């Protein structure tokens, strides 16, 4: 695709912009891939557009969830706003990448044309999990320290009371 050409007529993304962003940008017609930007190819672990052109986008999803994803895509096609769902995509080496995938239908005569944008969320989910564990650890340490201080205050009060009695 030539530099800075619209991916498709009426599509805001140009090939140049799509290649510069850090998200997967894909155009499918009737479920078949017509375009994937370079960032998307890297995310899928694929070196050439020729490898994916003409493939079903859902071939990159977990087999056990394809039926569910197929229904979600149909739902997205009937909703002018599209649909965004978390899903796992299977990359070329067989590993899975957790992605937030937006399916956006586009108006095209006699076909189901869809723009797909996907952003990897594995790192974000990992960071969220690390933060959650750190928060839980901090909460436990605060509770432990509060308990220690409560005991210490009790001991000081008893010591003060004892000193008053001896004074």
Image (cartoon, grey):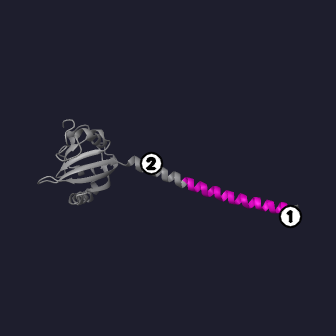
Q: Is residue 64 above or below residue 9?
A: below
Q: Position of residue 54 (x, y in %)?
A: 17, 45
Does label 1 or label 2 sit earlier along the sequence?
2
Q: Main secondary structure of the magenta part?
A: helix
In this orientation, which residue lies closer to the viewer: 37 or 7? 7
Residue at which label 1 appears: 165
In the rendered image, residue 152 lying in the magenta stretch gets the answer: yes
Residue furthest out toward the top: 3
| Helix, strand or loop at mark 2 | helix
In this orientation, which residue lies closer to the viewer: 70 or 131? 131
Q: Quadrant of the N terminus?
A: top left
Q: Is residue 86 above or below residue 49?
A: below
Tell me where the magenta segment starts and ends, as one range. 137-164
- Residue at the spot x=84%, y=62% of the render? 164
- Residue at the spot x=60%, y=55% of the render? 142
Q: Position of residue 88 (x, y in %)?
A: 32, 51
Q: Which mark is residue 127?
A: 2
Q: Position of residue 38 (x, y in %)?
A: 27, 39
In the rendered image, residue 145 lying in the magenta stretch gets the answer: yes
Residue 78, by quadrant, is: bottom left
Give me the C-alpha separation between circle 1 and circle 2.
56 Å
């Amino acid at each position: 695709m030539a530099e800075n050409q619209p991916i498709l007529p009426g599509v805001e993304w140009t090939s140049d912009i799509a290649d510069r962003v850090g998200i997967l940008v894909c155009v499918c017609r009737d479920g078949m891939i017509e375009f994937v930007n370079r960032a998307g190819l890297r995310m899928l672990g694929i070196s050439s557009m020729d490898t994916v052109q003409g493939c079903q986008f859902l071939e990159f999803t977990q087999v056990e969830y394809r039926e569910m994803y197929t229904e979600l895509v149909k739902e997205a096609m009937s909703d002018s706003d599209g649909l965004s769902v978390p899903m796992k995509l299977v990359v070329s080496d067989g590993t899975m990448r957790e992605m937030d995938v937006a399916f956006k239908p586009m108006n095209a005569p006699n076909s189901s044309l869809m723009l797909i944008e996907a952003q990897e969320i594995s790192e974000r989910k990992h960071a969220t999990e690390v933060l959650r564990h750190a928060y839980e650890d901090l909460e436990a340490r605060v509770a432990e320290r509060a308990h220690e201080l409560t005991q210490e205050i009790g001991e000081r009060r008893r010591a003060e009371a004892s000193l008053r009695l001896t004074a």
